[in-house]
Image (spheres, rainbow, N blue to C red):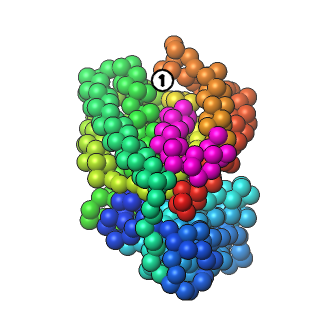
Amino acid sequence: MRRSSRPMRATMTIAAIAALTGLTACSSSPTDAGDKTDTAQKTTSKIGITLKSGGSGDTCDIDSTTAHAGPVTFTVTNKNSTAITEVELQSDQRILGEKENLAPGLKPVSFTVTLDGGKYQIYCPNAEKQMQTLTVTGKAAKPTGSTHALLKQGTKGYAKYVSAQVASMKDAAATLEKKIDEGDLAGAKAEYAKARPFYEHIESDVDGFVLPGFKATDNKGNLDYLIDMRASNLDKSAGWHGFHAIERDLYKRGAITDQTKRYAAELTKNATTLVGVAKKLQYKPEDLANGAAALLEEVQSSKIKGEEERYSHLDLVDFAANVEGAQEAFAELKPGLKKIDAGLTKRIAAQFDTVNSMLDAYRDSDATGGYKSYTPALRHKNANKLSQTVQALQDPLSHLAEKVASA
């Protein structure tokens, strides 16, 4: 699961936010960021965000605080800041887009969102100036045409996929809870491994949904936090919950306690809540593209490092699930994307094949979860190869959101 450097995160899919705030999927005529005319645009505005260390505090520098309505691509570069590892675009305390795990010196990363006229906030936790205002002028045009129809059809198909994965996770969580209540340690470990992939398929889409009555900065109302928070980024005010608290008990402590049973019951409850949430989510094409990119960034930032499943060493199971989820999003966009950029479509498809072929080498039918245990020794020998292969897919995939948002 993607995790913020600060002990909170809260996200909702952009389309769902649009339903709440009145934002609409659109594109309009070309301008640069900062052009204050009200003409709709078809090309994408660009906004660069640079993170730097400083004597009086680390800075989050934005090269333009205005943009035109329509698709806007935010590219984040972390020069050398160690304090700022996350950037969010917010509106009405909802996160419209974000990038996390922004380590100093890594390649710039981007996300694209379609914005209507209004005021937005760019939030850089731990920066000297944490919150800055972005003013968007004009009104984004509604997308039309056969390509958009294909992309829209893809979003509907993907929405069904997300709902199915969440429903399966709820059932898997209930089975895990049953094994824990029975005190069956071996059975619980097996069920834990079976439940994980469902969430890892779709975590970029439903992660961080903020429950009604909670602020975006309050993890106590953040379903993503409550379901999938890791030990490395715990929020003391919210405590530990969800999958990885259970993982610690099962795999590190090797014991099922009353607290483990409470964790399991809460996980089932939150998974059930998420089923209802997922049914209401709607998507725009760039949501799928941003989500696919985010899943691969998640692979790089936590799975390959062995941080996600630090006790069970099931990271390759999660790795494969992230790739599968990203590939599903790409597949739903593919019919429309082929009309936009056939070359990019072919390149991304080929790189998915390469990543999947690489993963096949780590399959082990006798291992829990179906993949080799990602032990420190295996990680030491293989992390670089895994990272480079995923990066070769990340590079073309990073262009996908802008392509579909401006179609």
Q: Let me know if residue 141 appears in the view.
A: yes
**Residue at numbered disc 1:** 369
Residue 154: give x, y in percent of width and height: 43, 46
Name the side, left or right, on which 32 lies relative to 264: right
- Give the camera-side residue of 1 and 136: 136
- Identify the magenta region: 318-346
Q: Nearer the viewer, residue 65 or 384?
A: 65
Answer with the quarter of the image where residue 85 lies.
bottom right
Up-down relation of residue 256 to residue 3 (above or below)? above
Residue 29: quarter of image:
bottom right
Quarter of the image with the C terminus in it: bottom right
Q: Which residue is drawn at the image coordinates 61% and 22% (left, top)? A: 360
Total labels: the figure holds: 1
**Quadrant position of residue 83:** bottom right
Name the residue type under label 1: Gly
Q: Is residue 230 visible?
A: no
* Residue lying at 56% horizontally and 17% vertically, measured from the top left: 364
